[in-house]
Each structure stands twice: as C-alpha cells, then as structure tokens.
C-alpha cells in the first residue's frame, strides 16, 4: 500500500497544476454544499426552537395602569399558549436601556419624560407552525390595552421565505457543482493516465495486473477528494467565524439559540462525500479509458 501512496504522491507532484485545479474545484463545490448544509442545520434549529416556544414582547397602550395588570395577565393566560410571563414597567425598561447605552450616547440625559411603554414579556408554548404563532399573536393584539405584539415576525417571515427558497434551489445547485467537480476530477485522472501511457504499457508487458496499474490513480483521486473537502470546510469555518457573531446577536433578541457550526456528523458526511467524489471520478475515467 505504501508503494501505491508514494506513486500517487509522485504523480501529484509531477502534475501540480492539474491537481491544484482539481482540488480547488472540489473545495469550491464542497464549500457550496457546506454552506447549504450549514444554513439548513441552523435554520432547522431556529424553526424547531420557535415551534417549541418563542419569545414575544407585548407592548401596552399609554392608558394602561398597573391596576389593570391582573385582569390582563389572566386574560392572556386564558388563551392557553403561555409558558412564562414577566411584566416590565416602562421605568424598568428605561433604566435598563440607560445602563446598556450609557457609554454610547448622551441622549438619555436630555429626556424629560419616559417615551417607552409598559410591556409584558412572554415565552410561548410549543406550536406546530409559524402560522399558529401568527394566529396566537393576533389573538393577543386584539385584547384591550394591547398596542402591539412583537415576536420577530418581520425577520422570521423573511427567514422562512429564504429557507423555502434555499430548499428549492439548494439541491439543484449542489448537484450542479458536484457534477462539475466530478467532471474535472475525471479529466485530471485521464490526463495523468495519458502522461503515463508508455509506463502503463511496459507494466502490462511485464505482467502487472490491472489492479496494480489502477490503484495509484484511485489513491490519487481519494487524496484530491479528501484534501478538497478539508479546504472547503476550512474556508467555510473562516467565513462562519467572521459573520456568525453578528447574526447571533440579531437572533438572540427573539430566539433562545445561537448559530452553530456544522455538526460532527455533517462534517464526516462532507469529508466522506468529497473523498468518494475523487474516487468515483477516477473510476469513471479509468472505466472509459480501459474499455
């Protein structure tokens, strides 16, 4: 086996440019596939968390007084979809905002009155779909003294639209890029084979088996696929570390979850797929050449 590995490495060194192009193509294809997998994994987690109970803020009318709170909370709880409920007075909200923004702006020192409304923060129970959450929010908003209900409906609606769009196009794009990588891998092996045609003919004349001749090419294809997969995942990890914190901050206001990198299972699937891609490209090429 060591002989085949050394032979494959020697072929890679002798055809650096072709192998570089192949590895880059595989890595870009794997990157595209990994981006979709990363999005799907985190999108599914966000949707699952929301279905299990999302956070919402109920903003109350200016005429609201705390004497009305017991009746209003009983009415909201009577809807049967509340897991937790916390009343936040406008004074508490302003004090918290001042503490958080004190180092960033002097605006609060000029305030004469409190512009914030009283609010009730709730954590909803499990729902089957986003449409059920919307229906429940509309029920709350129809109550007296409720001015508005904010549960991330703007970003969550857009998020679901993007999720559905990715769902429709993801498989097609992944398939296209993998076919391109497969085509380039097969052609790289074909060119490597033709560059060694004389050597292969001599090996046949001295009695070398087809397996002995083909194995270095298969090892080369496996190397290309595996290295391409690793490079694609590294690029994805760098991008993830760069942008994930900003996305997580936006999500944190509405969802008790954070953005996570691909699971170990997904990483192993990607590496196996990229390695198989390199092997299968070699298999198709040799099958056609040696037909």
Image (cartoon, rainbow, N blue to C red):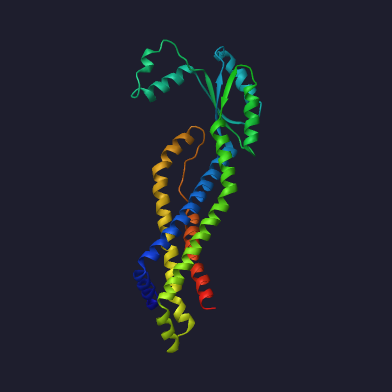
Is residue 171 or residue 267 the one in the foreground?
171
Is residue 75 or residue 227 the one in the foreground?
227
Q: Residue at x 55, y 38 (%)?
A: 159
Residue 51, placed above or below residue 280 = above
Residue 220 is left or right of residue 53, and the answer is left
Residue 287, placed above or below residue 39 = below
Q: Quadrant of residue 15?
A: bottom left
Q: Position of residue 158 (x, y in %)?
A: 56, 36
Is residue 116 or residue 273 the one in the foreground?
273
Q: Quadrant of residue 112?
A: top left
Q: Position of residue 147 (x, y in %)?
A: 58, 19
Residue 27, placed above or below residue 62 = below
Q: Residue at x 45, y 48 (%)?
A: 261
Q: Position of residue 176 (x, y in %)?
A: 54, 56
Q: Position of residue 138 (x, y in %)?
A: 64, 26
Quadrant, the N terminus: bottom left
Q: Residue at x 63, y 38 (%)?
A: 129
């Amino acid at each position: 086996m060591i002989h085949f590995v050394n032979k494959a490495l020697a072929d890679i060194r002798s055809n650096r440019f072709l192998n570089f192009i192949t590895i880059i193509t595989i890595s870009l294809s794997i990157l595209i596939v990994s981006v979709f997998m990363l999005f799907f994994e985190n999108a599914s987690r966000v949707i699952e968390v929301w279905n299990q109970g999302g956070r919402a803020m109920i903003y109350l009318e200016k005429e609201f007084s705390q004497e009305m709170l017991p009746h209003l909370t009983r009415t909201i709880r009577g809807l049967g979809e509340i897991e937790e409920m916390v009343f936040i007075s406008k004074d508490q909200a302003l004090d918290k905002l001042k503490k958080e923004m004190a180092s960033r702006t002097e605006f609060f020192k000029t305030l004469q009155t409190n512009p914030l409304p009283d609010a009730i923060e709730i954590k909803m129970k499990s729902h089957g779909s986003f449409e059920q959450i919307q229906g429940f929010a509309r029920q709350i908003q129809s109550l007296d003294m409720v001015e508005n209900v904010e549960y991330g409906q703007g970003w969550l609606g857009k998020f679901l639209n993007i999720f559905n769009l990715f769902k429709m196009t993801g498989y097609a794009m992944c398939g296209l890029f993998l076919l391109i990588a497969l085509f380039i891998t097969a052609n790289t092996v074909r060119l490597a084979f033709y560059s060694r045609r004389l050597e292969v003919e001599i090996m046949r004349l001295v009695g070398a088996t087809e397996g002995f001749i083909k194995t270095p090419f298969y090892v080369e294809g496996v190397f290309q696929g595996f290295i391409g997969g690793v490079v694609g995942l590294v690029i994805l990890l760098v991008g993830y570390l760069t942008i994930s914190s900003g996305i997580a901050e936006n999500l944190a206001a509405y969802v008790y979850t954070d953005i996570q990198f691909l699971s170990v299972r997904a990483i192993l699937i990607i590496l196996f797929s990229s390695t198989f891609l390199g092997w299968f490209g070699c298999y198709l090429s040799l099958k056609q050449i040696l037909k």
